[in-house]
Structure formats: C-alpha cells, structure tokens
Amino acid sequence: MDKTYHFRIADLGIKIVFRGERGNSLQLIPSFLPFLEEKETDDRLFSLTVDDSLMPCPKAQREHIRDFDTGNGMTFVDRLENGGYQYIIRDVEGHDCCLLITNGDFTDCRCALNGNYNMRCFGLNNALMLAFAFAGSLRQCLLIHASLVRQDDYGYAFVAKSGTGKSTQVSMWLRYLPNCDLMNDDNPIIRIIDGKPYIYGGPWSGKTPCYRRTKAQLGAITSIVRSETNFVDKLGPIQAFATLLPSCSTMKWDVKTYSKTCDTITQVVETTKIYALHCLPNPEAALICNKTIKVK
C-alpha cells in the first residue's frame, strides 16, 4: 500500500510517496517532520516516489556525464535520452545506497533504496537534497552551504570551506550578541520573492540538528577568511558572485539549471550586501562583524 506525505520547505511543497511494503517510511527522514503538512499545499516543487523495485535505465538509453565527491561519498550522474537524469548515490564506504531517476526539470523523481537503515537514510536524504536543489534552481531558489543566524528578524549567512570557521562565527553571535537564534548550520535556503531575498531553515543541517521551519529577510552574506587580525571588507559585485557560486548546489553540466542558478545569484548580489570577514576565532571577531554587517 502506498503512503503519501506532504511537506512545505521554504514555502514550497514537496510530495513523497513510499510504495510497497519494504519498510521504507518517514523514519528514514526524521529531520523532515517539522515540515510535515496535513494535506498538499499549493506551489509544489517536486514529487518523489520511493519504490525499491525501480531499476536502472538501460545503458543504451543514457550517457555518463560525470562523478562527483559530495564529501560523504560519490555520486554518479548519467543523462537520459528523454532529458532527465539518473544518479547512483554511494556512501563514504562505497556502498550503493540510492538509485534516483528524474525528469528534465526535476518535478517528477523516483528512487530505489538499498542496504541497512543507515544506508537508506543516507540515500533518501541525499536524493531529496539533489531534487530540491535542482528543481529549486528553476524557481529562483538556492540551496546554499552556509551557517545561518537570525538577529532582529534578519538572517545572516556565513559561507566558507568546511573547517574554516563559519559555525564558530555563528556560535560567537549566539553567545555574545543579543536577540540571536540559530536557523540552520549547514544548508539554508535562499529565495527571491517579489524581488526581495529571503532565507529559510530546512531539513538539512549537517552535524548540528537544527531543522527549523523558519524564515527571515536576508540581511547579509559573509565569507569567513582566516586571518591574524579581525576586519571586514565589503565585496564588489564580481567578488561577491565568485564567493557565492561555489557555495550553491548546482550542475555545471546542465545549461538550463546552471544558467538559472547564476541568474538567482546575480539577483542576490544586487539586493544583498556581501562581505568578507577576516578573523580569528574569538568574540571580538563577532562584535566587529556584527557592527559592520547588521541591518540598521
């Protein structure tokens, strides 16, 4: 028997159908529970059907595009004859965890899960993240690798390579600055709505379990740069674009989605101040940063 669930993430609807009796259920995606809806809402972004009987497309009907390392495993991408995609998602140990097949605009997705509970959790979460990122790219929506703190109704996102200190900076804001709360610690979502940038919490938050149904106007985006002194630079448009692009989930090999992602980043740059914080991991850095970037 099919079990259908509806979610609302960043004010966009998602439909997930679990097909069959193989034990796949909401227990695989507990971080999605805060986003669960009683019934389907308007403005659906995509649907995903989880069906373990799904088989890979015949080799004659697909072309291998590339492999990429997510940091937690490898993903193998093939383009299908009908314009859609096939993904094989493997975990860090090299186990096949998920087969994902999509149509060309990622509105209709199907996946088969494999392995034990942890493998299935990993596979389904990654399939949903891919579908959300690539379907969202066509709707002025960006899934961004960042840590996000809210202060006085504005969201402030910090971007950096893993281990550089974005979570450390956010922790300093939470500890030493007033009226702050954590919205997301790894993958917040940016949307352009009526020409204005907004940022949301979501069901993906890295090692910090922060899965909150939150929304704020985007106040600023700041890149973290390690330094021996604390100071802030405001970035020009070209530097700002170059800073944001690597932090956004996108597919350079798909012209349509990549072009739409770049268009949305351009809108973010045009409507949001982008900074570089050169800093030590100390409270003074948070105070200097806040004084410079906070929306007055």
Image (cartoon, grey):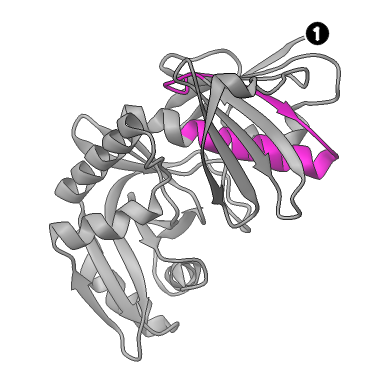
223 up-or-down from 254: above or below: below
Q: Tag 1, which secondary structure?
A: loop
Quarter of the C terminus within the rendering: bottom left
Query: Relative to residue 221, is residue 17 drawn left or right?
Result: right
201 up-or-down from 277: above or below: above
**Of 253 and 200, the residue lying toward us:** 253
Q: What are the residue bounds of the magenta stretch?
A: 103-132
Place residue 39 in its image quadrant. Answer: top right
Q: Is residue 110 magenta?
A: yes
Please provide percent x and percent y for residue 172: 45, 73
Please provide percent x and percent y for residue 82: 47, 15
Residue found farthest to the front: 60
At x 70% / y 43%, what residue is drawn?
A: 122
286 up-or-down from 195: above or below: below
**Of 57 and 197, the residue lying toward us:** 57
Report if residue 91 is visible in the image: yes
Classed neighbour count for the residue bearing mark 1: other residues with Cα under 10 Å, few (<14), some (14–19), many (≥20): few
Q: Is residue 70 magenta?
A: no
Please provide percent x and percent y for residue 154: 31, 51
At x 37% / y 40%, what residue is drawn?
A: 142
At x 61% / y 58%, what residue is drawn?
A: 208
Look at label 1 and name its amino acid: Met
Please provide percent x and percent y for residue 120: 76, 37
Query: Relative to residue 282, is residue 98 drawn left or right?
Result: right
Query: Relative to residue 76, is residue 214 drawn left or right?
Result: left
Residue carrying label 1: 1
**How many numbered marks, from 0 up?**
1
Quarter of the N terminus within the rendering: top right
Report if residue 29 is visible in the image: no
Residue found farthest to the top: 1
